[in-house]
Amino acid sequence: MDRHAVHGVPRPNHGLASALRMASLLPHVATAYTRHLCRGDDYLGERRLYEFTPTLRFGLQLALVFEFAGRRGRVASLEAFRDYAQRIGPAHLPPAEAAVCEEALLGLGMAPGSEVSQAAQTVLQACHDLDLLRCCGRDKM
């Protein structure tokens, strides 16, 4: 593994390839949560939070692509995502679903803002963590 800076990028993650890998994981991670998350009395209540509409899944994939936009921090990433979501319009990403994506993106690594964004944030974080497995050595795996 090479963890040395190459062309100013300090680690082998947080680049476009990483963003695309995370985005490609999202449908599979979301499906895994809906199929296997909770069992028992709360199963249906919890499961419904992870049954994302196709446009919300698309928005969450976009959020992952913009997670480290320009490596300038979370606020810059959120602004880039918001700008792009507005440009593609509500036919592709309705405003309510864009807001869930924004809240989930902004909240990564922090407490969730709402029940709906918590599910979205959990899936985004799982995609992020799964992509980081490629940076781990055998002992850490």
Image (cartoon, helix red, strand yellow):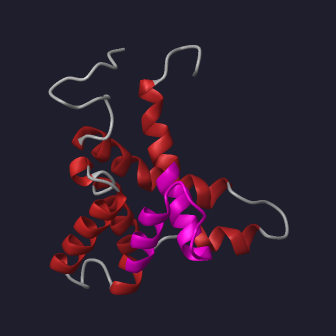
User: Does the image show residue 94?
Assistant: yes
Q: Position of residue 129 (x, y in %)?
A: 50, 41
Which residue is drawn at the image coordinates 33% and 42% (left, top)? 21
| Figure disc tally | 0
Q: Quadrant of the C terminus?
A: top right
Q: Quadrant of the N terminus?
A: top left
Q: Position of residue 70 (x, y in %)?
A: 21, 51
- Say if 11 sits above or below 68 in the image: above
Residue placed most toward the observer, 67 or 5 = 5
The majority secondary structure of the magenta stretch comes to: helix
- Say if 30 sits above or below 11 in the image: below
Residue placed most toward the observer, 30 or 104 = 104
User: Does the image show residue 30?
Assistant: no
Q: Position of residue 24 (x, y in %)?
A: 35, 48
Q: Quadrant of residue 43?
A: bottom right
Which residue is drawn at the image coordinates 46% and 47% (left, top)? 127
In magenta stretch: residue 123: yes
In magenta stretch: residue 139: no
Q: Quadrant of residue 106?
A: bottom left
Q: In the rendered structure, which segment of residues is drawn in magenta?
A: 99-125
Residue placed most toward the observer, 110 or 66 = 110
Which residue is drawn at the image coordinates 41% and 47% (left, top)? 25
